[in-house]
Image (cartoon, grey):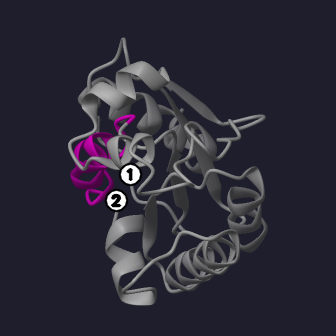
């Protein structure tokens, strides 16, 4: 699906449990978005390594991290770069803050049962949580607040990454290119 250039950049936040498929969808979506213009993926693990090289994942640290992530995204969008947030953002407040900074914003709920996310978890996040090495894993020890009104809901058990990317692009086209609907 090709989308004609938009007049403004925008942001898409892929949110869901760890290992729900956010990064896989982001990888499928990015080249399609690059047909419109420049795109930056703000992947939480990559950004976190820069902001907090020795993360504790405490509530205060997470609050600061997500505020910083949203601010970075807002600055990029303000300069014409479309932003793809690839981040759990386990609290609605984190995503709502980004939405308050970025008027052209789409929230994508990547829906995946905890059991499946745990099976997919190649990083060992859930295993560390189960072994007591981490006490703040979203969906395990920390609540994950599902989006109240996402613009897009992706059933990660039913859609491939490419199908999910197409579904997101349809919403981008409707929301930001109304003359091309």
Residue 31 in the image: above or below residue 163 = below
| Residue 17, percent from left and from top | 49, 39
Q: Which one is in front, 13 or 79?
A: 13
The residue closer to the viewer here, 93 or 27, is 93
Spatial CA distance of label 2 from label 1 is 6 Å
First reached walking from the N terminus: tag 2 or tag 1: 1
**Residue that lies at the very extreme toward the top in this rendered image:** 158
Provide the major secondary structure of the magenta segment: helix
The answer to whether one can see residue 41 in this image is no
Q: Is residue 162 visible?
A: yes
- Quadrant of the rendering where the C terminus is positioned: top right
Horizontally, residue 10 falls left or right of residue 100, namely left
Q: Tell me: residue 125, above or below residue 50.
A: above
Q: For label 2, count other residues whose C-alpha is less than 10 Å away and answer few (under 14), some (14-19) or many (20+).
A: some
Residue 116 magenta-drawn? no
| Location of residue 171 (image quadrant) | top right
- Identify the magenta region: 20-35
Magenta stretch: includes residue 32: yes
Residue that carries the numbered disc 1 in the rendered image: 4
Q: Position of residue 19 (x, y in %)?
A: 35, 39
User: Which residue: 55% across, 76% down?
Assistant: 69
Quadrant where the N terminus sits is top left
- In the image, 86 versus 118, the foreground residue is 118
Mark 2 — residue?
Answer: 36
> Disc number at residue 151?
none
Q: Nearer the viewer, residue 65 or 167?
A: 65
Task: Name the residue located 54 percent from the left edge and 69 percent from the top edge.
Answer: 57
Q: Secondary structure at mark 1?
A: loop
Are the residues tagged 2 and 1 within 8 Å (C-beta)? yes
Name above or below for residue 111 compared with residue 32.
above
Q: Is residue 55 above or below residue 99?
A: below
């Amino acid at each position: 699906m090709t989308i004609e250039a938009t007049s403004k950049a925008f942001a898409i936040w892929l949110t869901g449990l760890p290992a729900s498929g956010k990064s896989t969808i982001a990888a499928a979506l990015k080249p399609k978005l690059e047909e419109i213009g420049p795109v930056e993926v703000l992947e939480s693990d990559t950004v976190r390594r820069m902001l907090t090289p020795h993360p504790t994942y405490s509530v205060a640290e997470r609050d600061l991290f997500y505020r910083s992530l949203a601010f970075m995204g807002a600055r990029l969008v303000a300069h014409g770069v479309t932003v793809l947030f690839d981040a759990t953002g386990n609290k609605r407040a984190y995503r709502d803050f980004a939405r308050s900074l970025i008027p052209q914003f789409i929230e994508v709920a990547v829906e995946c049962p905890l059991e499946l996310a745990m099976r997919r978890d190649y990083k060992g996040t859930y295993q560390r949580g189960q072994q007591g090495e981490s006490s703040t894993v979203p969906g395990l020890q920390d609540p994950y607040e599902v989006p109240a009104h996402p613009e897009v809901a992706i059933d990660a058990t039913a859609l491939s990454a490419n199908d999910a990317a197409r579904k997101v692009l349809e919403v981008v086209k409707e929301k930001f290119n109304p003359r091309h609907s």
